[in-house]
Image (tube, rainbow, N blue to C red):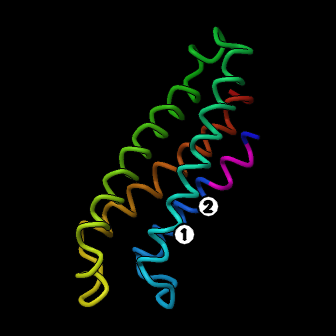
Amino acid sequence: MHAIGLAIAVGMVFAMNLRLLGLYTTISLSSTRKLLMFAWIGIALNIFSGFSLFMTQASFYVTSPPFLVKITAIILGIVALVITQKTMDREMATWDTSGISSKGRNLAIGSLALWTLAVVTGRLIAYL
């Protein structure tokens, strides 16, 4: 369940952010905005399954540096997603006609970095 939620959430967020960075220009911004509903479903699945996994070895996880980095990256990634969503709602019409603003591109780069960090450190938990 955790892997499915991860694939949904990170997949949708990556698709939207890559569109904001200028890839997939044949896909409209409003279409990528609609994908965010699925990202939130994936995040909800991950929160539920993540708490379940956390409870199995809570004392190990709270002392694991990769886990702490992962949780921090996820929280910041969710904050970035909320800000991106609000910015898209406000500026999407302008972006469709005159291109993505630097704020939109910076949000996309930051979001990609945070979600990549979350995935990588999540995998490292078992090894470090």
Instruction: From the top left corner, tell me how far across and down residue 125 is, in percent.
Output: 67, 30
| Depicted 60 relative to depicted 22: above or below | above
Q: With 36 as the anchor, is 49 left or right in this view?
A: right
- For the residue labelled by badge 2, is the local secondary structure a helix, a strand or a loop? helix
Q: Write down the residue under mark 1.
A: 15
Label 2 to label 1: alpha-carbon separation: 6 Å
Instruction: From the top left corner, tell me how far across and down residue 55 is, in percent.
Output: 68, 15
User: Is residue 65 or residue 19 the one in the foreground?
Assistant: 19
Q: Residue at x 26, y 90 (%)?
A: 97
Q: Residue furthest top?
A: 59
Q: Write down the residue under mark 2.
A: 11
Q: Which residues are magenta?
A: 3-8
| Depicted 90 relative to depicted 40: above or below | below
| Depicted 9 relative to depicted 100: above or below | above
Instruction: From the top left corner, tell me how far across and down residue 9 is, in percent.
Output: 59, 53
Is 74 inside the magenta-drawn segment?
no
Q: Are marks 2 and 1 in contact (CB under 8 Å)?
A: yes
Q: With 16 as the anchor, is 94 left or right in this view?
A: left
User: Is residue 27 or residue 65 the one in the foreground?
Assistant: 27
